[in-house]
């Protein structure tokens, strides 16, 4: 059965499947066009090699995103040192028990 024009989910559900039938229902049913999730284990060196293969514009966009993240993390680390004294027992002036 083929679709005249774009296929709708209802059209695809009416098709008969002639291949082997699944023996387990462990695999969740996905919508048409949804891709399964894949996890890859990539070393730092492999990741560097992949990044260096990006087209120039995509590489620059990625570099900007990484730079923004580095700046945010740096500011967070600096702010942690500024507020470290708040964790000292005698510094909690609003605590009724202090």
Image (spheres, helix red, strand yellow):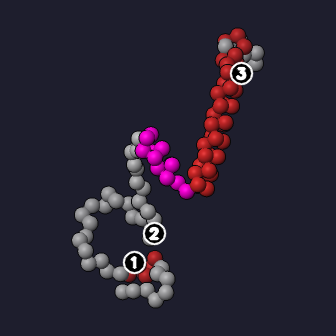
Residue 82 is tagged as 3
What segment carries the magenta color?
44-55
Q: Between disc 3 and disc 1, whose residue precedes?
A: 1
Q: Name the residue under label 2.
A: 33
Q: Between disc 2 and disc 1, whose residue precedes?
A: 1
Q: Which residue is drawn at 45% across and 69% down?
A: 33
The answer to whether residue 53 is magenta is: yes
Q: Is residue 94 left or right of residue 71?
A: right
- Expressed as whole percent of the image width and height from the top left, the position of residue 97 reads 70, 13
Q: Residue at x 32, y 57 (%)?
A: 26
Q: Is residue 42 left or right of residue 74?
A: left
Evaluate whether residue 96 shows in this view. no
Main secondary structure along the magenta-highlighted residues: helix
Q: Between disc 3 and disc 2, whose residue precedes?
A: 2
- Expressed as whole percent of the image width and height from the top left, the position of residue 22 reads 26, 66
Residue 18, above or below 60: below
């Amino acid at each position: 059965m083929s679709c005249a024009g774009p296929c709708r989910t209802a059209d695809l559900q009416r098709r008969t499947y002639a291949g082997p039938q699944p023996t387990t229902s462990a695999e969740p049913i996905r919508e048409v066009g949804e891709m399964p999730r894949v996890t890859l284990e990539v070393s730092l060196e492999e990741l560097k090699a992949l990044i260096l293969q990006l087209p120039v514009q995509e590489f620059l966009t990625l570099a900007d995103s990484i730079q923004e993240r580095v700046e945010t993390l740096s500011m967070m680390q600096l702010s942690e040192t500024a507020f470290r004294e708040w964790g000292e027992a005698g510094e909690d002036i609003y605590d009724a028990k202090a």
